[in-house]
Image: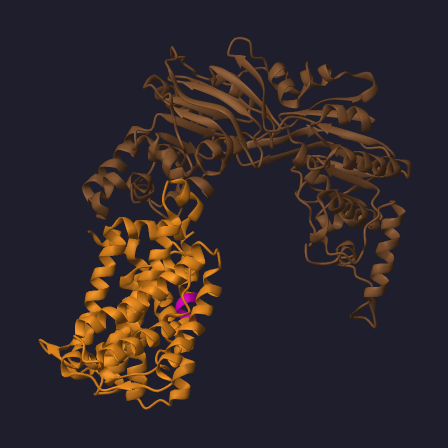
């Protein structure tokens, strides 16, 4: 692919990438602790959970939807999985149950939206509360802690010096990127978000595929739950609070439109990295956590404003 | 109104139209779909501005800038779609934007209700001013619109097809009110297609055709047949390159099709190599017919046969599998996913070929899209172009390409050339010729009479959900088709 075509089709992602690189450059000049292999690997590990949750969110946003329940599903799937794991059952069974809970909650979201015709905002707002309550009820509000080394290795082990969470994150990104760009399911996701009526009139089962999209979003939340639980050696019923906001932020910084039909996982990954690098850098520079929130909020707004201005100019 | 002209991109909507309205008269505005009635009234009501011409009110020249300005000049318009806020009470709707207030900013609900009650009483309308508008029927909502207009001291009232949603008794009530207004000296512009009504309520009539005024008459001096001739009588100058093909066996048979929404026992037969034109006025049920055949709207009763075999088409998916392709009236809303590329739009109904077992075959995808671009001569730099960036004619070709790639052989063209420039129109007609030559059958819905007459081998006319006329190509004339569409005999 020549450079012009690259710019035409991926201009938005390149813009975000340029922003990320500028940020890396600035931080490297300001603090000697930033640009070290160990710090960069730390950033990649820290960012992995938010980045994985953002995968499902991106697919949902491409279909012109939203999922507010990702953080709650993460907690619910985490505590159920943790409880199974403590019963001395095989680790794969525990993982399957945890991922199954995530997919189940997601599919339920999807059914409420497609069969129940609820707006995605309302359906997932309800699920946000239900799954959170479910997690608290399931554990009586107490964390579930202490797992086998085999399970903990999912977060603590390394391969070629790369932490396992980073590898899982990359795996999820590659798989879902292929899903979006190389499968029928991906085409339908973009088509439903771009024009649901025309998609229906092209003979596509919109209800089925939209339900599956929310199921996928539940799945990525549950994968994030596995890493979080293994890393903390504990599943908290209050885990994942406000993760939906971080995931939405990464997605829109990465160029997806809340109107649907647009967005890529490459963009979302860059968006998630941008937020992770920013947090890490601000910590190294010892900026107060209160000010950090202000800065991150401003970055989200500026990124989207810039995007909108550029799009207007192109027209 | 004198010498009014207005152009939209590609269309001369109005050309030197004169129109006058006396106090205390009902002046009917008559013309086919697209004759310019709505545009003329939009200019009068300030919703759009004329390119040329002048408007005099009570002898004074006026430039009507906005709908609000028109209202302050005493011109009120009641559109087919009402401008009411459903959840607010009747009184608040009547006074929306000029609510009676106390102490400068507090709403005076009691005064509002009292004034509303008085205004309703003046028109002899029994509606509770406190009732939310959403609880009222269509006829009552229309009364609210009339009341609202009069409370603005309207001297000119424009009514756009006011009876289209009313039943017999409600129409009588409306007419009684219209007569009362006329007696009070209000001038009323009345747009309607219902000939019998026009003679009942109208004093004078102005006929428009293709943006020009044909004539103004006193209704006492003319007959229905005269008016239809004036509406339809145009020279057929446009070139329609129809090359008829000897029709083969039926590809699509519809018997007694009835839906909950509109259709009442529609039967038709479309044969191989044939273009069957469907004429009718807006709201006659033509688009509903297309949607029912394509499996979008549920069918209540009736039978559809494809290639002679009974077919159950309960979803677009099943209709597409049966070999039917729909080119919808509004292609931007229903035909294409605009942000997606040509390539992806063509792939959408063809995923069984492009994504066998769900996985993309890039070469097949490009081949299909390239075939479509080359075969239909779509003007685009490449197949990755977003379909929203194409012109209307090229977008229509992409929609057609979706079905050609599937080798569909039954096509429903709903307003195939709407919003398409002249050159591209002829190209679309040629493509229709090619399709029928290759053995397809085409159901062509069109509001443009010359197009229907010029391209169809046979013509069905619809009115109020029924087929009200059938003509062969040789016996069809503009007057005869229009008369069947209007439900009169010319």
- Image quarter (top left, top right, bottom left or bottom right) of the N terminus of chain B: top right
Magenta portion: prevailing SS class: helix
| Span of residues in magenta | A301-305
- Residue B337 location, quadrant: top left
Indicate yes or no whether the magenta region holds residue A304: yes
Let me know if residue B41 appears in the view. yes
Q: Residue at x 22, y 65 (%)?
A: A172
- Residue B41 location, quadrant: top right
- Residue A120 location, quadrant: bottom left
Question: Which of these two is toward me, A129 or A292?
Answer: A129
Q: Is residue B196 above or below residue A76?
A: above
Q: Position of residue B461 (x, y in %)?
A: 57, 21
In the displayed structure image, the side of residue A309 where residue A230 appears, left or right = left
Q: Residue at x 43, y 81 (%)?
A: A294
In the displayed structure image, the side of residue B149 where residue B354 appears, left or right = left
Question: Which of these two is toward me, A101 or B434?
Answer: A101
Q: Position of residue A232 (x, y in %)?
A: 25, 85
Let me know if residue A19 appears in the view. no
* Render colour scheme: by chain
Q: Residue at x 59, y 31 (%)?
A: B12
What's the colour of chain B in the image? brown
Q: Position of residue B151 (x, y in %)?
A: 83, 50
Q: What chain is the orange one?
A: A
Indicate yes or no whether the magenta region holds residue A19: no
Question: Which of these two is toward me, A164 or B41?
Answer: A164
């Amino acid at each position: 692919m020549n450079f012009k075509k690259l710019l035409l089709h991926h201009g938005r992602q390149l813009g975000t990438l340029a922003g990320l690189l500028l940020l890396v450059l600035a931080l490297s000049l300001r603090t000697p602790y930033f640009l070290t292999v160990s710090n960069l690997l730390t950033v990649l590990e820290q960012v992995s959970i938010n980045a994985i949750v953002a995968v499902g969110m991106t697919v949902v946003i491409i279909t012109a939807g939203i999922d507010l329940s990702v953080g709650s599903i993460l907690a619910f799937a985490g505590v159920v999985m943790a409880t199974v794991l403590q019963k001395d059952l095989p680790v794969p069974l525990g993982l399957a149950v945890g991922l199954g809970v995530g997919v189940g909650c997601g599919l339920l979201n999807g059914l409420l939206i497609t069969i129940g015709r609820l707006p995605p905002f309302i359906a997932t707002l309800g699920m946000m509360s239900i799954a959170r309550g479910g997690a608290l009820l399931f554990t009586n509000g107490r964390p579930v802690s202490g797992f086998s080394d085999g399970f903990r290795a999912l977060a603590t082990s390394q391969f070629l010096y790369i932490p396992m969470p980073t590898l899982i994150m990359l795996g999820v990104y590659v798989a879902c990127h292929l899903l979006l760009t190389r499968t029928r399911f991906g085409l339908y996701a973009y088509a439903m978000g771009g024009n649901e009526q025309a998609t229906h009139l092209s003979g596509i089962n919109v209800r089925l595929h939209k339900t599956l999209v929310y199921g996928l979003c539940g799945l990525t939340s549950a994968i994030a739950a596995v890493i979080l639980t293994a890393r903390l050696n504990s599943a908290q019923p209050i885990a994942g609070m406000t993760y939906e906001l971080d995931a939405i932020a990464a997605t829109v910084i990465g160029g997806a439109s809340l109107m649907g039909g647009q967005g890529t996982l490459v963009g979302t990954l860059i968006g998630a990295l941008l937020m992770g690098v920013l947090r890490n850098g601000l910590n190294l520079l010892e900026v107060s956590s209160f000010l950090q929130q202000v800065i991150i909020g401003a970055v989200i707004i500026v990124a989207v404003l810039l995007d909108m201005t550029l799009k207007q100019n192109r027209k | 109104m004198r010498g009014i002209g207005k152009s939209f991109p590609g269309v001369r909507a109005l050309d030197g139209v004169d129109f006058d309205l006396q106090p205390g008269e009902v002046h009917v505005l008559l013309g086919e779909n697209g004759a310019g009635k709505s545009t003329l009234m939009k200019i009068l009501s300030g919703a759009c501005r004329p390119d040329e011409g002048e408007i005099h009110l009570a002898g004074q020249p006026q430039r009507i800038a906005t709908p609000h300005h028109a209202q302050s000049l005493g011109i009120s318009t009641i559109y087919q779609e009402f401008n009411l806020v459903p959840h607010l009470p009747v009184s608040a709707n009547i006074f929306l934007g000029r609510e009676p207030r106390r102490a400068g900013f507090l709403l005076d609900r009691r005064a509002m209700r009292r004034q509303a009650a008085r205004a309703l009483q003046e028109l002899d309308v029994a509606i509770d001013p406190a009732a939310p508008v959403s609880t009222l029927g269509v006829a009552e909502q229309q009364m609210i619109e009339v009341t609202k207009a009069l409370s603005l001291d309207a001297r000119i009232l424009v009514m756009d097809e006011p009876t289209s949603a009313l039943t017999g008794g409600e129409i009588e009530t409306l007419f009684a009110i219209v007569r009362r207004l006329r007696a009070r000296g209000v001038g009323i512009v009345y747009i309607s297609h219902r000939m019998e009504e026009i003679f009942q309520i109208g004093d004078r009539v102005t006929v428009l055709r293709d943006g020009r005024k044909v004539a103004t008459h006193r209704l006492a001096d003319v007959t229905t047949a005269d008016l239809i001739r004036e509406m339809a009588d145009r020279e057929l100058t446009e070139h329609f390159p129809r090359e008829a093909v000897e029709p083969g066996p039926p590809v699509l048979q519809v018997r007694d099709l009835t839906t909950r929404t509109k259709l009442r026992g529609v039967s038709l037969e479309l044969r191989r190599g044939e273009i069957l034109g469907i004429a009718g006025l807006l709201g006659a049920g033509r688009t509903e017919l297309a949607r029912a055949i394509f499996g979008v709207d549920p069918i209540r009763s009736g039978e559809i046969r494809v290639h002679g075999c009974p077919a159950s088409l309960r979803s677009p998916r099943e209709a597409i599998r049966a070999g039917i392709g729909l080119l919808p009236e509004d292609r931007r809303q229903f035909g294409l996913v605009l942000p997606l590329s040509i390539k992806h739009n063509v792939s959408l109904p063809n995923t069984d070929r492009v994504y066998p077992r769900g996985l993309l075959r890039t070469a097949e995808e490009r081949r299909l899209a390239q075939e479509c671009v080359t075969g239909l001569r779509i003007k685009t730099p490449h197949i990755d172009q977003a379909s929203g960036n194409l012109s209307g004619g090229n977008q229509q070709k992409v929609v057609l390409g979706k079905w050609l790639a599937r080798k569909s052989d039954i096509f429903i063209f709903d307003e195939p050339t709407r919003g398409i420039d002249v050159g591209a129109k002829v190209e679309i007609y040629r493509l229709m010729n090619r399709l029928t030559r290759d053995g397809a059958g085409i159901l062509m819905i069109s509001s443009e009479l010359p197009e229907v007459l010029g391209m169809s081998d046979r013509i069905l006319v619809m009115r109020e959900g029924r087929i009200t006329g059938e003509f062969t190509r040789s016996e069809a004339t503009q007057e005869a088709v229009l008369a069947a569409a209007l439900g009169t005999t010319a």
